[in-house]
Image (tube, rainbow, N blue to C red):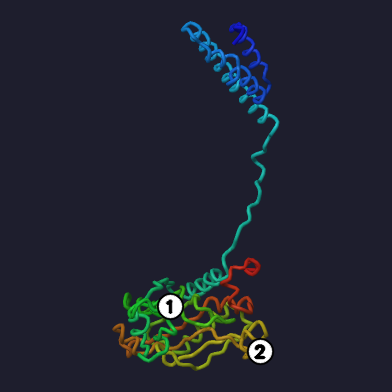
């Protein structure tokens, strides 16, 4: 430097500038001017050659840094006071309403099914999705030649394990775990190698019921299914029962519900029949009872299985079951 500054005057000027700063920006500008890299104090410290001058300048810099820090804290407090005074918020006012979702229609139907069967005194189960061939086929009296045992119809992990094709294995599990009388409905995902159509999907949810007691007849089964169908679809929908064949029930029936889309006149969804199949049902085959150690002469039972997606489709008159799996909010927001 050519002229040695009066450091006492320099300190006093810097302190006055700090106190005069009305905002944080003004204070930062003054800090750069008096303590920045190009300030007189910074340049003076670079040219120090003796101990006394160094101690003097370091003392001035330290005191000024404290002055600026104190003023910065004061300005921050003043800014907070101003915001608290001017930006008044009534914390008792309701906040912004957040958009809420809702249950998926499949979940809604599942809960309706659970409520219907709990009202009848049934136990609700949710068993494993990976099953053994023994429980998925053998103990349910599937013949060795049944098409469901083929890898073309069923997802096999290995020769002994499959993705369950239905919730029927739950029937075997509960009959092995508990003594009759038994009233149970099992609900969960099942898997089949089905082609995707308006009424079929390779992954779907099923509810499967089982009742084992003394003296049960086909009339008890029909009465139970009629009660559940009316709870799900209302009394105005028609229900019919047709004879059929299933490996683990004898005799077997198939419940159908009238198509709500075409009102029974025939359309693509119901394959122009006016009816949509709900699933399978029938009296438990005596072989199945014997497979779990129950005497078919003492005990009788009935079983039934229906799809939740099919139920949702029928309840809401959805023309294509694929809409329930595509995640399109334009569809799902309607329910």
Q: Quadrant of residue 284?
A: bottom left
Residue occupying image coordinates x 34% and y 84%: 139
Q: Which residue is mark 2?
A: 266
x, y (%) of residue 247?
Answer: 40, 90
Please state if 12 lies on the left or on the right of 184 as rendered. Answer: right
Task: Say which mark, if any, is on residue 167.
Answer: 1
Picture layout, residue 108 above or below residue 269: above
Confirm or deny contact between disc 1 and disc 2 (CB under 8 A): no
SS for callout 1? loop
Viewer-closest of 276 and 223: 276
Instruction: Work out whether residue 20 or residue 121 is closer to the camera in this orientation and state it.
Output: 20
Rendering coords of residue 17 (x, y %):
66, 15
- Residue 244 drawn at (x, y percent): 48, 93
Which sits in the foreground, 309 or 63?
63
Q: Which quarter of the rendering shows the C terminus? A: bottom right
Between the residue at mark 1 and the residue at mark 2, the CA separation in whole angstroms equals: 31 Å
Quarter placement of the N terminus: top right
């Amino acid at each position: 430097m050519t002229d040695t500054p009066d450091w006492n005057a320099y300190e006093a000027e810097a302190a006055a500038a700090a106190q005069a700063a009305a905002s944080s920006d003004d204070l930062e500008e003054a800090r750069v001017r008096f303590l920045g890299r190009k300030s007189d104090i910074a340049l003076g410290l670079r040219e120090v050659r003796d101990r006394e001058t160094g101690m003097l300048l370091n003392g001035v810099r330290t005191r000024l840094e404290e002055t600026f820090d104190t003023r910065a804290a004061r300005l921050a407090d003043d800014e907070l006071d101003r915001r608290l005074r001017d930006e008044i918020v009534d914390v008792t006012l309701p906040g912004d309403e957040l958009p809420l979702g809702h249950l998926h229609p499949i979940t809604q139907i599942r809960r309706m099914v659970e409520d219907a069967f709990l009202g009848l005194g049934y136990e609700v189960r949710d068993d494993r999705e990976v099953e053994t061939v023994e429980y998925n086929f053998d103990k349910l009296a599937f013949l060795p030649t049944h098409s469901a045992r083929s890898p073309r119809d069923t997802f096999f992990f290995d020769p002994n394990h499959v993705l369950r094709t239905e919730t029927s294995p739950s029937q075997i599990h509960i009959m092995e775990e508990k003594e009759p009388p038994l009233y149970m409905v099992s609900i969960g995902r099942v898997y089949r190698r089905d082609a995707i159509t308006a009424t079929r999907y390779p992954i779907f949810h099923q509810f499967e019921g089982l009742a084992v007691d003394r003296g049960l007849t086909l009339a008890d089964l029909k009465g139970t299914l009629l009660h559940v169908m009316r709870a799900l679809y209302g009394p105005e929908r028609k229900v019919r029962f047709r004879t059929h064949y299933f490996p683990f029930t004898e005799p077997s029936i198939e419940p159908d519900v009238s198509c709500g889309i075409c009102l029974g006149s025939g359309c693509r969804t119901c394959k122009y029949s006016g009816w949509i199949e709900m699933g399978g049902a029938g009296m438990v085959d005596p072989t199945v009872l014997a497979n779990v150690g129950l005497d078919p002469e003492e005990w009788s039972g009935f079983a039934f299985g229906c799809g939740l997606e099919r139920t949702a489709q029928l309840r809401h008159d959805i023309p294509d079951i694929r809409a329930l799996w595509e995640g399109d909010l334009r569809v799902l927001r309607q329910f």
